[in-house]
Amino acid sequence: MKPGEIITNKDKDFIHANEHLHTILVKVSNLGDRPIQVGSHMHFFEVNRALEFERDKARGFRLNVPAGTAARFEPGDSKEVELVALAGKREVYGLNNLTNGSVDQ
């Protein structure tokens, strides 16, 4: 066994993450002049202001990508990304200080 290795049941083809959580699609455009990278667990509502999208729609959501990965938005690029609802207490503190509490308020 290697550090970080995951040994799965040979009868299963895939590991399903976020299977029972609500997901949405949003179109995101980078209006800035520099690339912007957003990590897997960043509250998408609070990402860099140079990213244009339906920000209110993203409250309480993060990228639906594997933990530790990110999405990169090049200057002038537009693409659709899938977001998944935050789980647990659904509270966000810090980041860009836009929430600092429950995402459901």
Image: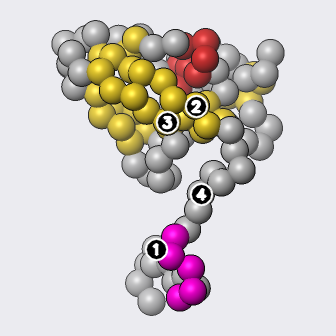
- Closer to the chain start, of discs 3 and 2, is 2
Q: CA distance from mark 1 to mark 3?
A: 26 Å
Residue 29's disc is: none
Label 1 residue SS: loop
Counting from the top left corner in percent of width and height, residue 17 is at: 59, 57
Label 4 residue SS: loop
Q: Amino acid at mark 4?
A: Ala
- Closer to the chain start, of discs 1 and 3, is 1
**Residue with the mark numbered 2:** 24
User: Which residue is found at the position 36% from the left and 37% from the top?
Assistant: 71
Q: Nearer the viewer, mark 4 or mark 1?
A: 4
Label 2 residue SS: strand
User: Main structural element of the magenta stretch: helix, strand or loop?
Assistant: loop
Instruction: Tell whether 29 sits left or right of 41.
Output: left
**Residue with the mark numbered 4:** 17
In front of the other: 50 or 18: 18
User: Which residue is found at the position 33% from the left and 26% from the top?
Assistant: 79
Counting from the top left corner in percent of width and height, residue 85 is at: 66, 36
Q: CA distance from mark 4 to mark 2?
A: 15 Å
Image vertical order of residue 1 relative to residue 60, above or below: below
Q: Quadrant of the C terminus?
A: top right
In reply to whether residue 12 is colored magenta, the answer given is yes
- Closer to the chain start, of discs 1 and 2, is 1
- Closer to the chain start, of discs 4 and 2, is 4
Q: CA distance from mark 3 to mark 2?
A: 6 Å
Q: Answer yes or no: do the residues labelled 3 and 2 have beta carbons within 8 Å?
A: yes
Counting from the top left corner in percent of width and height, residue 31 is at: 28, 10
